Image (cartoon, grey):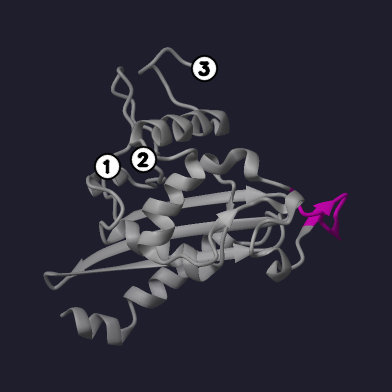
Amino acid sequence: LHIPGWGSGYSSFAYNLAGAVTAAAAGGFANFTELVTDTVMDELNLTTLSPGYVWKDKTLLVDDWTDQFEVINDKTVLSKRHDISWKLPSGGFVSSTEDLLKFCRGLTQNKLIHQPKAMQIPYENIFGLTSEYAVGWKVPDPQNPKHLSHNGTHIGGLSQVDWFSEEIGGKKSSVCIVLFSNTTNYSFPIWDLSEELYRVYFYNKDEQKRLQ
């Protein structure tokens, strides 16, 4: 932990606390799930996004989940399904890739937040030191925030969401890329694959011609 303004750190509990505070401050919601349902799921028509209540079999995706794998002692084995509903504000929801793509588009098209620039401004402590994280996003290059990313890991799975934006010939273009992997084998280059797809999208001749 840090004295406020002195530093930053990764904390699922902090996001859980922030989620509870946000739901209470918004008013009219019994919990964070109701808040997300009203302001995100219904707003963007996300039909598969739901809390990860695996142990209660309440999620609509349980029957549709692919098998998940993890690497133990250099062997890939089938992973158990783990309940992740205890950390809803910090990554306890499950979704299809299509709905996560809709969520990314909702953010980039300013349908969910009133101050989109906050997603591109990295945190700075009282000493003037800048981290690589902004509100909800990682900013790999704070001086040139054209690429925002967020990833998550869970036993048996990896996820990666990237938002790339470019301006070519005075025209702006952006793309969201969502990748899932059903293994926690970190040797799988899911992070590098996203950047390769970005290069294919922005630097192919058809997209260059459309933007010019």
Q: Gap between marks 1 and 2, in whole Å?
A: 6 Å
Q: Nearer the viewer, residue 163 or 95?
A: 95
Tell me which amino acid carries mark 1.
Ala
Mark 2, other Cα within 10 Å: few <14 / some 14–19 / many ≥20: some
Residue at the image point whose x is 52% and y is 51% from the top: 151
Residue at image point 44% right, 66% down = 101
Q: Quadrant of residue 74?
A: bottom right
Residue 124 percent coordinates (x, y): 31, 28
Q: SS class of the residue under badge 2? A: loop
Magenta span contains residue 73: yes
Q: Report how far apart the C-alphas of labels 3 and 1 lie in the structure.
A: 23 Å
Asked if residue 195 is positioned above or below residue 39 in the image, the reply reads below
Q: At 28% from the left edge and 63% from the top edge, which residue is drawn?
A: 165
Q: Are marks 1 and 2 in contact (CB under 8 Å)?
A: yes
Pointer 1 residue:
118
* Badge 1 density bin: few <14, some 14–19, many ≥20, Cα 10 Å: some
Residue 116 left/right relative to 63 = left
Q: Residue 144 in the image: state x and y as whole percent.
A: 27, 50
Q: Which residue is mark 3?
A: 1
Specify which label sits upstream in the sequence, 2 or 3.
Answer: 3
Residue 195 visible in the snapshot: no
Amino acid, disc 2: Val
Q: Are marks 3 and 1 in contact (CB under 8 Å)?
A: no
Q: Nearer the viewer, residue 154 or 93?
A: 93
From what the image shows, is residue 25 above or below residue 209? above
Pick the front one: 58 or 137: 58
Q: Which residue is identified by label 2?
A: 135
Three-letter residue code for mark 3: Leu
- Magenta range is 70-82
- Position of 185 compared to 90: left or right? right
| Residue that extends furthest to the left in the rendered view of this protein | 170
* Mark number displayed over residue 33: none
